[in-house]
Amino acid sequence: MTSLTTSPATSPGTSPTSPTVRRGPAGLLREVVRRPSAGVVGLLVLICAVMTFLAPSFLTYGNWYNLAQQMVFVALLAIGMTIVLITGGIDLSVGSVLGLSAGVMAYLVNQGMMFGLCLLLAVAAGAALGLVNGLVVTKLGIPDFVATLAMLGVAGGLLYLWTGGVPFTGFMIPVYDTLGGVTPLVGDLTAPILAMAVIAVVVAFIMRRTSFGRHAYGVGGNREAARLSGVDVGRVRVTAYVLSGTLAACAGVLLAGRTTAVAPTIGVGYEIQAIAAAVIGGAALAGGRGRVLGAVLGALTLTVASNVINLASVSPTWQPVAVGTILLVAVGLDRASASLSRRLGRAAPSR
Amino acid sequence: MPASRRLARAFAVEGVAVAVIFVGMVVFFSLASPFFLTGGNIANLLVETVIIALLAAGMTFVLVVGGIDLSVGSVTGLSAATTMWALMSGLPLPVGLLVGIGTGLVAGVVNGAVIALLGVNDFIVTLAMLSVGAGLLQVVTSDVQLTGVQSDAFAWLTQGSVLGLPAPVLIAVVVVLVLEFVLVATPFGRSAYAAGIGPRAAELAGVPVRRVRFGVYVLSGACAGGAGVLLASKLNSVQSGLGSGYELTAIAAAVLGGISLAGGRGSVWRAVLGAVFLGTLGQGLQMLGVDPLWFTIVTGLSIVAAVALDRVVGRVALSRLLGADRPTGGPADPSTPLRDAALENEDPRSVQPLAGSAREARTS
Amino acid sequence: MPDRDTQEPGPQELLRVEGVVKHYPGVVALSGVSLDVRAGEIHALLGENGAGKSTLINVLSGTTQPTSGQVLVAGEPVQLRRPRDAQDLGITTIHQELSLAPELTVLQNIFLGRELRRGPFGRGLLDEHAMSARVQGVIADFGLTERDLRRPVGEFGALTQHVVEIIKALAFDARLVILDEPTSGLAEEERVMLFDHMRRLRERGISLVWVTHRLDELYGLVDRITVLRDGRTVATTDTTESTPADLVRLMVGRKTTSLGVIAEGRTPAERPADPRAEVLRLENVSRRPVLRGVSLTIAGGEILGVAGVAGAGRTELARAILGADRIDGGRILVDGEPVRIRHPRDAYRLGIAMVPEERKTLGILADFPLDKNTTVSRLGKVARLGLMLDRRRERAVTRDYIDELGVRTTGAGERIRNLSGGNQQKIVIARCLFTGPRLIIFDEPTQGIDVAAKAEVYRLIHRFVAGGGAALVISSEIPELLHVSDRILVMREGAIAGEVRPDLRGDDLEADERVSAEIMSLAARSVA
């Protein structure tokens, strides 16, 4: 008696699926509820509409160009976070990984190493940190948020020690001006914006069209089922952390170019923004659900929110407070939508 | 006496590695630095340890019910700031203390309400609170210079002594004894263990699980508030970023003390042992001229090491040693494959007919 | 695609298990199991809880490695190290907890872990067309449409989810499908449909190993039966050659049928001639959609049974009375006074206690010792000044219950997880008694405990009622209800479908048959 079937008995002969087929308004509502990213777009449009009235400078090309420039870093982290969330994990270390990778990049460029090689090594550093996360979580069986919290402390501490508290500077060779988006690459488009677009498309493709993506959803949706179906659960989870680390490193390399210095605090607080963006974008903390496009929209929402804070001439020190609050609201809504969709699902078959 | 036997057993089993390393550490630091075992240093070590111990004690309650509180660090910093602000506004000392502890209490109430009443994921909520707390601290410190309170009584909290015993130690001993009593010997504490062991079973047995869950976050918040007051007294100055990283230290202390992240297991004095361990380590590193940032790294690593040790050694060797006395996580039911208790403590998200998930919704 | 011809159940042997032994630290789960399954037969695997059925399945599905012994498939010895090894040999296991990811679609679930791929990069891309084409021929047979393939599995009911698992097996040319208690959680009609599906599989020449403990389902469906007891095979017989009584004897190993044990508990003389004062009354209690207008009364000294199929709302009724779920309509009266029960704690204060179903997850607090399990529902009774728990009293109280209820244990300080199921259940009953209740709700009180312990649980229920208490007993086993209850309410789709009175003498088999037929028809009739 472990489960109760509320769907009333189907009389033999009818299709067993018939009682669960639901159309009409309730079905439509269910669809909307099942795709919380629809809600994000609504929220975003609402904020934009209100801001357009209140602040004339909001709906200008210049402002949105800046927004696009700013959102890149959170968007990349949120995409990585979404992958990890889909597999049912969480990665609290992305801020530190971002920072340390940026540090590797700046240091190597200063050593006069070939730029491409620096780039490769910096991204590899992020991937390696992600690999450590993944192995600690899967092989040692340490809860994900504890393992990645420890990594947050370790990687953050290492960057502090390495820099000695003094930012790395002087690595802004001309090619880095382009990579960092100081000078545009194609037309008005800068390298970070292009990188974000390309990465988002590639990751979306991976999650939808490759077996890794499919397995990631399976592992997050029902780990035991995935295991019994022959999915190498451990490898999928480790890969998710590696991807998250890699994307954090990409964000770090780009962010270093934008800030033109790698301060030891460069990545502090980014993990919360990344989680908030992913959750706003419809990734479920319980796993099995999430979209790359949602993560990008989530990042845009957060960026617009801090833009709103700016335009309203509120001190930017309020920004973490806002992010924390938005995260709370988003998770609360996620929870509410889950229970609402469950209620709809339960009510429907009983007529 | 059962207490001493329990102590011995706990040390012999769960704390054995910690104890050995601890003694080794003290010997090493004493040899390496002649100042290590001197009065001044011990007093200094104590304040830091007491703050960690307070946070770890609060964290223990949260861990026992199977939750986690990542906000304690930033709440500690914020409480330190509000304490300083109250005292600098000329409010009397008791009011200042209440303001500090009250700040933590409010944060705890918000955490507890959102987690227990709305049922939102605990580490996300407390992570958001971490952000909110750190942000508010930044806001407060960017407006006013919080430093230089002229109050001997305030300074006494961390620098004073009674009959040769340092005041912070007295405070810590009292608080820890009270909290240990609450956890082990009161209906609230018992309910906390029950809620951690099996929330659904506990609920059906009449344990007010939600209320207990709410209570532990409030308690953890209050402990963070108290820690903030001590921190303010110690530094007599509050800057943005104060307290960040303490959540890691508190969790590490609890975990080093053998408290399970899966819930249902742990006690305050063990967390305090872990805090003493970490406090000594931090101080020792400082005496040796090692950059204190190494401490963060070591703390992070020690969590991983402690949990891994608990997992690997605990499962294989200690379960044999203890036989029935400890959850082995293994062969209690031979029909189910070995499962990892901590990872599987949530209901497996197995597919069930829709009504199955409806029930999950009701009980969660 | 299964390309095998339909074949007569012949003597060709598909699977042979020889002397498989499995030791866990401190426990012997299997101590010599043998099994042979022929091609194209339905083979039932019977046994009580703890007989080793689950471990054997785990061995056959590659999730557990045996300590010794061997498994042969089509005469060849094989090593099953991972689930994949078994699948590659054509052995598919459909576990009791269905192995599906709710967010993935039917098609995605069918191919999870074994996706068909294409493309240049190590064939890393998914080939949706090929996957959908591969199951095309099968889905119609099992009542699924093309559209259903693209919908998340979580939207379907339990039967369809079983069907998805079956198609999953067919898509990869399974030769042997192991079904682990597939009918639990299915309504009567759904079970019948599942049996049709099983026959269809047999027609395709696929062998089925069907794990169950419901004897009534075997006849007319199963070809041969293997009975396990205490981790070893005790017999393999043809279904036509053994009666249910034989099978029960083989499973239990003693010459007692469960009915006999039940009957000895309480003689008609013990039943109060006139029920005492009413303890609980429900008026039109609703919790939509699971409960609709339930009204009932229970008096002191009375045992009220509640029957119904899974999903009829029995457990929901219990949870509503206990306050674990809110009700959205109707009144609950205790001693004639309307009461508001918002939380189980309120219920315990009002003298209502519950022994929950699913003892392991909902009943015991596994890491607590016996004494803490006993007192947890009413800590105020062992707290000085309501503040300080008196450990000595807790121990003393628990020791009293251990003696009184005959709990086999090393002492009040032992962890409850180390006890056998029956003894755990006695401690859960002790917890209820400790709260000083006048009504105890027993939800599937004998689920998963052995026959001897069942008898003791019945005796405890009887003793409680003889002392003036009232009991509400929910059970899926009709014989159990017939012999325990004074009255039996039958629930269907969240409402009371009717009430029957069992024959009180408890030895008239014909009367029992008649009453159970009445219960079945009340429970199953569709809404007029």
Image: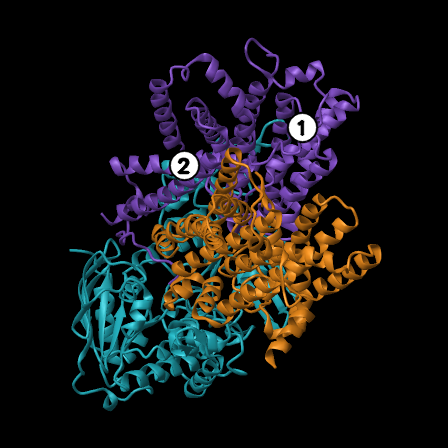
Chain colours: A purple, B orange, C cyan
Amino acid carrying label 2: it is: Arg
Q: CA distance from mark 2 to mark 1?
A: 48 Å
Chain at tag 1: A
In the rendered structure, the answer to whether residue B92 lies left or right of residue C434 reads right
Report the amino acid beneath label 1. Answer: Val
Query: Would you call the spot at circle 1 few (<14 residues within 10 Å), some (14-19), or many (20 or more)?
Result: many
Q: Which residue is mark 2?
A: C150
Q: Residue at x 63, y 47 (%)?
A: A150
Q: What number is the disc on residue A262?
A: 1
From what the image shows, is residue A55 above or below residue A265?
Answer: above
SS label for mark 2? helix
Query: In the depicted view, which residue is nearer to us: A37 or B230?
Result: B230
**Quadrant where the N terminus of chain A lies?**
bottom left
Front-most of B126 and B304?
B126
Position of residue C127 relative to residue B313, above or below, is above
Of residues C223 and B213, the one nearer the viewer is B213
Crowd around label 2: few <14 · some 14–19 · many ≥20 (10 Å):
some
Q: Pointer 2 and pointer 1: residues touching (CB < 8 Å)? A: no
Identify the residue at the far top of this view. A187
Residue B77 screen position, x and y as percent: 55, 45
Query: In the rendered structure, the residue with mark 2 lies on which chain?
Result: C
Q: Is residue A222 left or right of residue B285?
A: left
Which mark's residue is nearer the viewer, 2 or 1? 1
Q: Which x, y percent locates residue A76?
A: 56, 29
Q: Is residue C75 above or below residue B239?
A: below
Residue C340 appears in which quarter of the rendering? bottom left
Q: Secondary structure at mark 1?
A: loop
Closer-to-camera residue (C393/C370): C393
